[in-house]
Image (cartoon, helix red, strand yellow):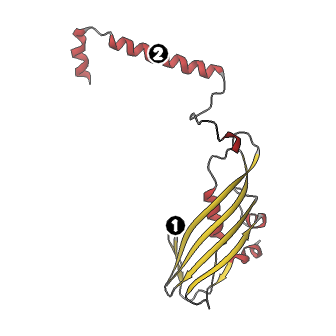
């Protein structure tokens, strides 16, 4: 699958300083080239604007497309539309080193860069952690699910117990109220 990722090579040696534009298409073969199971199917168009200078490369990514996901709640398949704008910088230096999430140092004299891993990472990070089918968008998130009426009754009895304790605290004998304030 290495051959599939070679499509995302950019020859930087011989590029004049200034702006350059590149376009890539990402499809199922691209995702299959990475050993992962997060994304299996998707179609994306990648527009890349590369600004080259003597000391660095500035890459502006504009990625739009869709990915096929499985709903966490219903296990139904659905398509999630994704639009991403990211910036990544390659600086020229003595040795290759990742400096930050959005910056890497590459050796002087590097002939090319491969943006496949960057594109994959941007898409993977844009996928929502909670994958819900669009039909669940209108529902309010209550912070959890109630699976049976027993659970609902248990919640109601907990509320009643708390209310009874609050009532008892309000009916405290005034002689004990002074001691209660010392407890705080």
Q: Position of residue 178 (x, y in %)?
A: 21, 15
Q: Position of residue 8 (x, y in %)?
A: 69, 76
Above or below: residue 36 compared with residue 6: above
Q: For the residue carrying disc 2, how many other residues have a C-alpha within 10 Å: few (<14), some (14-19), or many (20+)? A: few
Residue 101 tag number: 1
Q: Quadrant of the C terminus?
A: top left
Above or below: residue 12 compared with residue 178: below
- In which image quadrant can residue 163 be found? top left
Above or below: residue 174 compared with residue 26: above
Q: Position of residue 45 (x, y in %)?
A: 70, 68
Q: Position of residue 63 (x, y in %)?
A: 65, 66
Position of residue 66 in the picture relative to residue 175 (left or right)? right
Q: Quadrant of the N terminus?
A: bottom right
Residue at 65 percent across and 41 percent down: it is 137
Position of residue 54 in the picture relative to residue 132 (left or right)? left
User: Whole-Å distance between the Cαs marked 2 and 1?
Assistant: 50 Å
Q: Which numbered disc flags the more N-terminal residue, 2 or 1?
A: 1
- In which image quadrant can residue 30 be found? bottom right
Residue at 37 percent across and 11 percent down: it is 168
Above or below: residue 47 compared with residue 159: below
Residue identifier under label 2 = 161
Position of residue 71 in the picture relative to residue 162 (left or right)? right
Q: For the residue carrying disc 1, how many other residues have a C-alpha within 10 Å: few (<14), some (14-19), or many (20+)? A: few
């Amino acid at each position: 699958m290495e051959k599939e990722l070679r499509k995302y090579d950019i020859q930087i040696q011989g590029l004049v300083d200034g702006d350059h534009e590149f376009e890539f298409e990402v499809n199922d073969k691209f995702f299959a080239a990475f050993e992962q199971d997060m994304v299996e199917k998707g179609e994306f168009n990648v527009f890349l604007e590369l600004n080259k200078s003597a000391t660095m490369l500035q890459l502006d990514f504009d990625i739009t497309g869709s990915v096929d996901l499985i709903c966490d709640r219903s296990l139904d398949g659905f398509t999630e539309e994704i639009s991403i704008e990211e910036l990544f910088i390659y600086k020229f230096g003595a040795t290759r080193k990742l400096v930050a999430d959005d910056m890497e140092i590459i050796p002087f004299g590097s002939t090319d860069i491969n943006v496949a891993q960057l594109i994959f990472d941007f898409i993977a990070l844009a996928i929502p952690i909670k994958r819900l089918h669009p039909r669940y968008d209108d529902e309010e998130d209550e912070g959890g699910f109630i699976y049976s009426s027993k659970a609902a009754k248990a919640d109601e009895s907990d509320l009643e117990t708390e209310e009874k304790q609050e009532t008892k605290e309000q009916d405290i004998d005034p002689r004990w109220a002074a001691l209660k304030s010392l407890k705080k």
